[in-house]
Image (cartoon, coloured by chain):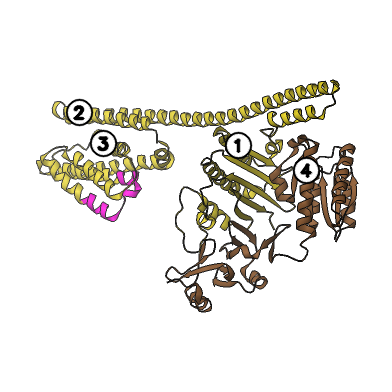
Chain colours: A brown, B yellow
Amino acid sequence: MLLNIIICEDDRTLRMYYQLIIKDYIKSHPDIDMKIMLSTGNPNDVNIYLDNNPKEMKFFLLDIEFPNSKIRGIDLATKIRKNDLNAKIVFITTHEELMPMIFERKVEPLDYITKEKGINNIKRKIYTDLDITVERLVRPQNKRLKEFNFRIGSKQYNFDINQINYFESLEHTTNVFLHATNQNIEFPDTLKSISHKVPYFYRAHKSLLINPNNTQSINKKERKIYFKDGSSCDISRRRLVDFSREHPDLIKK
Amino acid sequence: MEQFIIPSWLVLDFSNTLLMYISIFLLIPNLYSKRNVILSFSLSLLFTFIDFYFPNASLLLTFFTYLLFLKQSKLNINLPIQIILFLVSFLLTSLTQGIASYFVIKVFNLGFSVYSFKTLLGTILLTLINYTLTLLIIIILKFILHLDTIQNIIHNKTVIKMALLSTIVITVSYASLILMSRHEFNQLTYLKTTLLVSLMSTIFIVIGSIMLVMGYMKEVRSKYEIRHLKERNLYIEELERKNTELRRFKHDYKNLLTSLSVSLRSNNSNNDSIQRLLDYADSNVDMTSTVENANLYHLNDDLVKGIIITKLVAAKNKHIETNFEVDQSILIPKTLSVEITRILGILFDNAIEASLLTNNPEISFALVTFDSYLEFIVKNNIASSEKINLDQIYQTGYTSKKDHNGLGLSTVNKIIHSNSNLLLQNKVKDGYFSTILTILEDK
């Protein structure tokens, strides 16, 4: 599949320079199918391109501030991300415009390149970013992780199922907590609908849905299930009997 | 003929002791219980007879039983206030008794004469007037002057000490006058002096306590204002610091540009020197530091803005490296601003505490807007030795609600759990602990 490269930078000289770097890269990687589809100083052009090519695989090199346009780089990137979770976005900017945490949450950019560090640095960075994009996007087309998807507001989250220990419903809200290794996320959903999405998860309690693939051991005395990362959750007495019958290997004496 | 006078004195003594207990119960409602009422009733009876043999002994005895009551009811009233309340009720009953006796003897002309009927009538009337006056004054104190609230206001030690001192002085002088007058003057003069002294002392007490309370209120207000001023000063200092930093930055930049033009003109056109200058700029012109975001000052919610600025300044004062980002045009839902402020306060305190355990503490904060929701992100670096078990710190476990005190996270949990529009996520990654508070728009 073709990797489409889009450049948006209002400074003409710099834009030409980026184009040269990328063309060099393409030339030195003849086995990979990629092409600069758009190189422009006007963010509106990018918007038009996005509307016309929703399905393509894309790599963006974006400036953050466009003095001549009302559209900011962050808005453009947010729009890209909303329609395409896989697109790779690299920001190239001056230092003081940077708000890394906001960009991280809104866009999840691949990288930031700061203009102050000089031309050689820009070149080196673009090369590594393209390497990563090729590595992640172009090559492993078929090798996909098993994912659990959910939404918070308008944002889609894809979560590696193997990382999930258990789901927990909350008493007074319509929200569910996802407990994973080193991460907890709360999102609006019910255990019932989740159990349809991941049928092999086990209802260990009225309010708990556990991932049996991540369990390490059962403690019958404490009525607790331990997970591989050391965390634990409760299990009801009745379910404990069922669950230990199904997984006799987990019982700890 | 004395046979009527002595019983009437006893009855009066008894009724007065009882009245004192009643006024104590009214002043401290928590003392009121069936057992205490019965006890006080029988005790007054007992003390009356003790008084008959040892004059004025009942006062001391009443005081001790009062202390006993207080001890058993386990109220958190400190000793000075206990004594003040007791003395107030004592003075009150004495005053009303004085007034009542004056009325009975002078106005109705019902002295304790040999005539049994007159003595009986006088006793009943005296008791009646005594009770009504006391109860009236207590009701005025309680419901019009709101004595309870005044009690709550007075926490200041000096105020309590002064009040204690003045009541003690008044009581002592009053008591000494009584003792003296009993020996020196005849009955009527004694009553008159009692009345006069009681009236005077009451007026002094009232004026004195009003002045004390007013003074105290003034002090509280000024303290509040001072705190406010301090906060404002911090804020101004922060702005000034930023201003100077900006000026320095401009200055540096001009210098750099000049030297850049010089190196260009020197015609070596050696890219190296330019590169070196750029490197220098990168390491020496502190561009990241605190050209902080003006968006923060445009937040629509003063509570939330306040907590963010306060904690930012607090973190800076502790030499923590801070990075604050606020998105454009943020609208914080007013209905949730208290909850958000409470949660943010706890999250910031934890972040500051945890980051201080590391060698170069860092805290980042971001406020991000999305189409239909907001995100507050608090992030701090953690000591590499620290291993955080996310389930443990929040105790979201179903039954294992152990008290993880000092973290305040259980409070966060409680707020989150009672509100569907607040979502929480936390993450440990690459030596950083981050918490994201999501505020969904009302559906």
Disc nearer the start of the sequence (1/3): 3
Q: CA distance from mark 1 to mark 3?
A: 68 Å
Q: CA distance from mark 2 to mark 4?
A: 99 Å
Q: Residues within 10 Å of mark 4 (few under 14, many from 20)?
A: few
Q: Residue at x 67, y 46 (%)?
A: B332
Q: How many marks are shown on the rendered structure? A: 4
Corner quadrant of residue B12: top left
- Quarter of the image with the N terminus of chain B is top left
Disc 4 residue type (three-letter): Arg
Disc nearer the start of the sequence (2/3): 3
Corner quadrant of residue A189: bottom right
Residue placed under numbered mark 4 in the picture: A124
Q: Do dots 2 and 4 share one subunit?
A: no
Q: Residues within 10 Å of mark 3 (few under 14, many from 20)?
A: many
Disc 3 residue type (three-letter): Ser
* Residue A173 at least partly seen: no
Disc ID at residue B176:
2
Q: Chain of mark 1?
A: B
Give, as a single range, the part of the protein colored magenta. Answer: B23-41
Give yes or no for residue B33 being in the magenta stretch: yes
